[in-house]
Amino acid sequence: MKILFATQNLNKIEEVQSILPQDFSVLGLTDFNFEEDIPETQNTIEGNAIQKANFVFDKLGVLCFSEDTGLIVPSLNGEPGVFSARYAGPQRNASDNMTKLLNKLGNDKPRKAYFETVIALRTKDSLKTFTGRCHGQIAFEQSGNGGFGYDPIFIPDGYLASFAALSKTIKNEISHRGQAMKKLISYLS
């Protein structure tokens, strides 16, 4: 089954393809020569996921799914949350985002955090959402060479290494995006 992932983020496309069973094939927006900016103007992760799925469906008219992910740090009143990708500014630079987060936490604030992913599946007749969460801690410094975004500073509960230092197999099994994708796969199957 081919399914359109409403994103231009190649890292996310690669990660999702590695999670899906072999009988699924992920298409990205570049496969449709779609280069428009997709709005993300909602104040919740779920709202952004729905907005993106509806926007792409309205433009292309094909079954698609989108996702939005945020890193939530309760001791920072939920920051960076819905603004995770652009936490340090519109340039969407992961290194800048991590530096800002680590500076705000300093050495004395509690470091508990969780990632939340919401996937919105849009068909001609319906809209469904699937949520995944992964709890953990924010490290004091970056480690690992894998992953993307905040992966080098997020240590999932039950592990001693960051997402960026864990194997793709382990990360996909326990991650927020992996959990939400499993729910999507179950629904589509």
Image (cartoon, grey):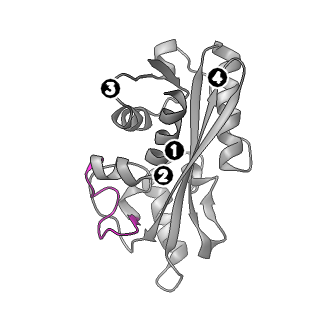
Q: Residues within 10 Å of mark 1 (few under 14, many from 20)?
A: many
Tell us which disc is closer to us: 4 or 2.
Answer: 2
How much space separates mark 4 and mark 2, taking CA atoms? Answer: 23 Å
Q: Which of pointers 3 and 4 lies earlier in the amino acid sequence? A: 3
Tell me residue 55's x, y (percent).
69, 25
In this rendering, which labeled residue sits more in front, label 2 or label 3? 3
Q: Are marks 2 and 3 in contact (CB under 8 Å)?
A: no
Q: Nearer the viewer, residue 27 or 92?
A: 27
Q: Which residue is mark 1?
A: 180
Q: Which numbered disc flags the more N-terminal residue, 4 or 2?
A: 4
SS for dot 3: loop
Residue at image position (40%, 23%) is 24
Q: Nearer the viewer, residue 76 or 172?
A: 172
Which residue in the protein does label 4 denote? 56
Q: Secondary structure at mark 1?
A: helix
The location of residue 57, given as percent across then percent down, is 66, 20
Main secondary structure type of the part rendered in magenta: loop
Nearer the observer, disc 4 or disc 1? 1
Disc 1/disc 2 C-alpha distance (Å)? 6 Å
Say whether residue 38 is visible: no
Q: Is residue 21 magenta?
A: no
Q: Which residues are magenta?
A: 154-168
Q: Amino acid at mark 1?
A: Ala
In this orientation, does residue 26 appear?
yes
